[in-house]
Amino acid sequence: MMKQLTKECAVYEYTGDGYKPLVDFKTWRVAVINWAERFDRANFERLERHNETDEVFILLDGEATLVVGEECRLVPMEKGKVYNISAGGWHHVIVDRERTETRLIVVENSDTCRDNTDYMPAKLPD
């Protein structure tokens, strides 16, 4: 949802499931991640890496965990901190629906897509 406050200011919000780009401007994009099946711990099966962009994650509400590197290191996220995954860095975000309503902000290149992303099967550590 977008609300135009003034000519200079728009407010965006997304409350549905999953990943949703909200603002695209030239070379960058801001998106929201809310719970979706693909982000649920029970459905984790792969890592991804973006070859042409860093990707920034910011936890706004709830609980989320970043899975980082080929060894699947679990990094519990803290609200308000900025987590930067370097271009080419293997990662995934886990959002557990059972715990809380979770919302994350994602900042990335506006052309980030499957064509410049690799995927690798992975398992979470015990």
Image (cartoon, helix red, strand yellow):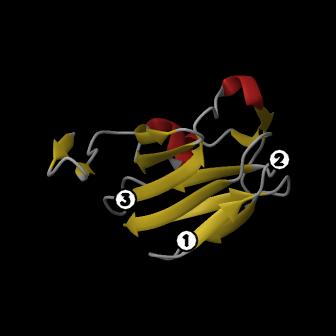
**Secondary-structure class at tag 2:** loop
Q: How many marks?
A: 3
Q: Which quadrant is home to the N terminus?
A: top left
Alpha carbons under labels 2 and 1: distance apart? 20 Å
Would residue 67 be seen by someone viewing this image from the given angle? Answer: yes
Q: Which residue is mark 2?
A: 88
Q: Give percent across and percent down for residue 18.
A: 41, 39
Q: Which residue is mark 1?
A: 77
Up the image or down, 73 lies above or below 70; here it is below
Pointer 2 or 3: first along the chain? 2
Q: Which quadrant is home to the C terminus?
A: bottom right
Q: Give percent across and percent down for residue 92.
A: 65, 49
Q: Amino acid at mark 2?
A: Gly
**Secondary-structure class at tag 1:** loop
Q: Is residue 116 left or right of residue 24?
A: right
Decide which of 78, 123 is in the foreground and name it.
Answer: 78
Pointer 2 or 1: first along the chain? 1
Q: Which residue is mark 3?
A: 102
Decide which of 29, 69 is in the foreground and name it.
Answer: 29
Q: Amino acid at mark 1?
A: Met
Residue name at image x 46 percent, y 37 percent: 37
Decide which of 3, 95 is in the foreground and name it.
Answer: 3
Looking at the rendered structure, which numbered label has been put on residue 29? none
Q: Indicate the quadrant where residue 27 lies.
A: top right
Residue name at image x 78 percent, y 36 percent: 121
